């Protein structure tokens, strides 16, 4: 459960990239579940807003060297 967050991820060029980001997001405190799709360049995260914020989650992705595209 948790709050659903979807955003775009740029800069992924192989399946290990998406796996790497997915694992990083998935182990973050407050994240219940994370999935990253290489083909669609989308991340879906279910998180607890009392523990972690979308901006913090975006930072985890950019810290790995990828880009974030926030949904409008
Ligand atoms: Mo694949 Mo992504 O070798 O940083 S893991 S390009």
Image (tube, helix red, strand yellow):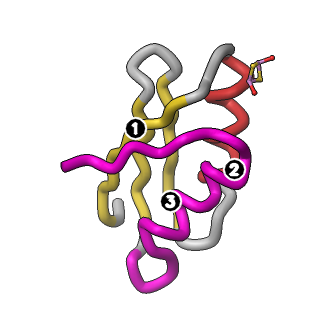
56 and 29: which is toward the camera: 56
CA separation in Å, label 2 and label 3: 12 Å
Judged by depth in the image, the label closer to the viewer, 3 or 1, is 1
57 and 47: which is toward the camera: 57
CA separation in Å, label 3 and label 1: 19 Å
Q: Which residue is mark 1?
A: 8
Of the numbered discs in the image, which one, if any, rests on residue 24? 2
14 left or right, relative to 70: right
Of the numbered discs in the image, which one, if any, rests on residue 44? none
Q: Position of residue 31 (x, y in %)?
A: 53, 63
Q: Position of residue 65 (x, y in %)?
A: 70, 42
- Earlier-in-chain disc, 2 versus 1: 1
Looking at the image, residue 43 lies above or below residue 53: above
* Quadrant assignment for ligand 1: top right
Describe the element under mark 3 as helix, strand or loop.
strand
Q: Is residue 31 magenta?
A: no
- Earlier-in-chain disc, 3 versus 1: 1
Give the position of the N terminus as an image quadrant: bottom left
Q: Which residue is mark 3?
A: 32
Describe the element under mark 2 as helix, strand or loop.
helix
Question: Exactly how many numbered labels are in the figure?
Answer: 3
Judged by depth in the image, the label closer to the viewer, 2 or 1, is 1
72 left or right, relative to 51: left
Looking at the image, residue 34 lies above or below residue 38: below
The residue at label 2 has a CB less than 8 Å from ligand 1: no
Which segment did they paint magenta? 49-72
Q: Is residue 62 magenta?
A: yes
Kindly identify the residue that appears in the image at 54 percent across and 69 percent down. Answer: 56
């Amino acid at each position: 459960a948790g709050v659903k967050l979807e955003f775009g991820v740029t800069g992924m060029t192989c399946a290990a990239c998406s796996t790497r980001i997915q694992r990083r997001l998935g182990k973050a405190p407050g994240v219940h579940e994370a999935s990253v799709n290489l083909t669609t360049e989308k991340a879906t995260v279910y998180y607890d807003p009392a523990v972690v914020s979308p901006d913090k989650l975006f930072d985890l992705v950019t810290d790995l060297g990828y880009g974030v595209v926030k949904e409008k």
